[in-house]
Image (tube, rainbow, N blue to C red):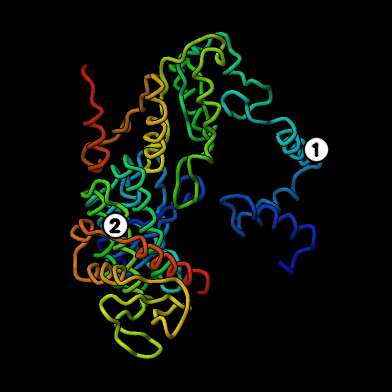
Amino acid sequence: MLVETEAIILRTYKLAEADKIVVALTRRAGVVRGVARGARRLRSRFGAGLEPPVVVDFAYFEKEGQELVSVKRAEVIRSYFDLARHRAAWEAAMYMSLLVGELIPANHPDERVFRLLRSCLDALSEVPGRWERVRRYFEIWLLRLSGLWPGMARCVRCGREWGMSEDTVWDKGELVCLRCGTGMRVQPTVRRAVGAALVLGPLEFAECEVPVGVGRLTESLITDYLENR
Amino acid sequence: MLEYAEPVTKLIDEFKRLPGIGSKSAQRLAFHIMRLPEADVERLIDALQEVKRKIRLCSECNNLTDVDPCRFCSSPTRDRSIICVVEEPYNLVAIEKTRSYRGLYHVLHGSLSPVRGIGPEMLRLDNLLARLKPENNQGVKVKEVILATNPTTEGEATAIYLSHLLKPLGVRTTRIAMGMPVGSDLEYVDEVTMDKALANRHEI
């Protein structure tokens, strides 16, 4: 069956003499993995369409029971090639692409993930020097869309709502009050920054102060998930 | 692989460990080896052992070589004031095929890749910076470094990183052009390639 959809190329690997394995986040079908025959040849029809991260008009054939699809077309809609000129921005873009491949299961369509990655890649190109904040925004939302983000309104153990200036702790993958657990402190400023991420767009969030605790929290959630899956 | 005798299974397993070789190809190669005359097999074994025994990295440019320094670094006819930086030894062969480049080379053995965990410390850069000094380059001052990393985002990021290292040292740093392949058609070129081709245009 031929599938035509918009996609973001997340990653490619060399295959045999002139081919590539492509991992793409598609708008219609979620993460798909496929083979692009001849993609490494000089006059390949794919051109820069498989240089991650890039948004493409993507077409592939899929057969029932086959894990890898056959990539037929990848025409550039929006390229982020020039992000490579700013190493931190490019590393953030590659990290975000890698994280989608790790957190989102294959063939599990969710257009929100596609829109999130696209908007964050756009933001990386538009906010010089504030790449770390875009990355944090992306982590918060991706964790939320993958169902890994913890409840933040109240203590998950005693059910009590937090006071505005109350410290909380991150204990065994749960956000709890100081009476219910011990572990990494999560300041109210971190909770407020997370709250802002959930109502703002990536460009607006990049304008906000983002405490280092946000990064500690997201990284801890991602590490816990990757180590225990 | 239970249906084959143990030595055959062992050979197939070894072939499967090679890059780009799957079960079917490994099986085909193993059966090919079994059909070869004894002398051909001996020759293959000799070639494998010789390459492991004799080939090492050139202490100046990191190219694969059987003599140190390699034939490029020790050649009196090469222009020592130009160094072309490539990612892998086989990239160097592509440039040599043009017969128009007469300078020296430097092989990085990789490119920056956050996804594969390759940072600047994992590239072979130390001896590149050392070679820029005339006392380490047979008294010749390096005038130009050509960055010939691949036209991929990883190659581009590596080139940009190197340019930031080299420019403050007062060396002219250039990047190979990106653009249209010879024999292609404008109709089918993608916007990124066309953009690079326009940016790298030259007067005729």
Looking at the picture, does residue A66 appear above or below residue B26?
A: below
Residue drawn at x 26%, y 70% is A192
Q: Position of residue B91 (x, y in %)?
A: 49, 32
Residue B97 shows in the view = yes
Q: CA distance from mark 1 to mark 2?
A: 64 Å
Q: Nearer the viewer, residue A90 or B39?
A: A90
Residue at point 22%, 52% (across, down): A77
Where residue B195 appears, as percent x and y from the top left, is 22, 37
Count neighbours of disc 1 (C-alpha within 10 A) and say few if under 14, some if 14 to 19, many if 20 or more.
few
Picture layout, residue A160 above or below residue A14: below
User: What is the three-letter code of the residue carrying label 2?
Assistant: Arg
Location of residue B167 (image quadrant): top left
Residue A124 placement (x, y as % from top left): 26, 51
For this orientation, the residue located farthest to the right is B38
* Residue at image mark 1: B39
Name the mark nearer the viewer: 1 or 2. 2
Q: Quadrant of residue A2?
A: bottom left
**Viewer can see residue A111:** no
For the N terminus of chain B, give its image quadrant: bottom right
- Kindly identify the amino acid type of the residue bearing the numbered disc 1: Ala
- In front: A26, or B121? B121
SS class, disc 2: helix
Query: In what quadrant of the picture does the C terminus of chain B appear?
Result: top left
Question: Which residue is identified by label 2?
Answer: A133
Of residues B39 and A194, the one nearer the viewer is A194
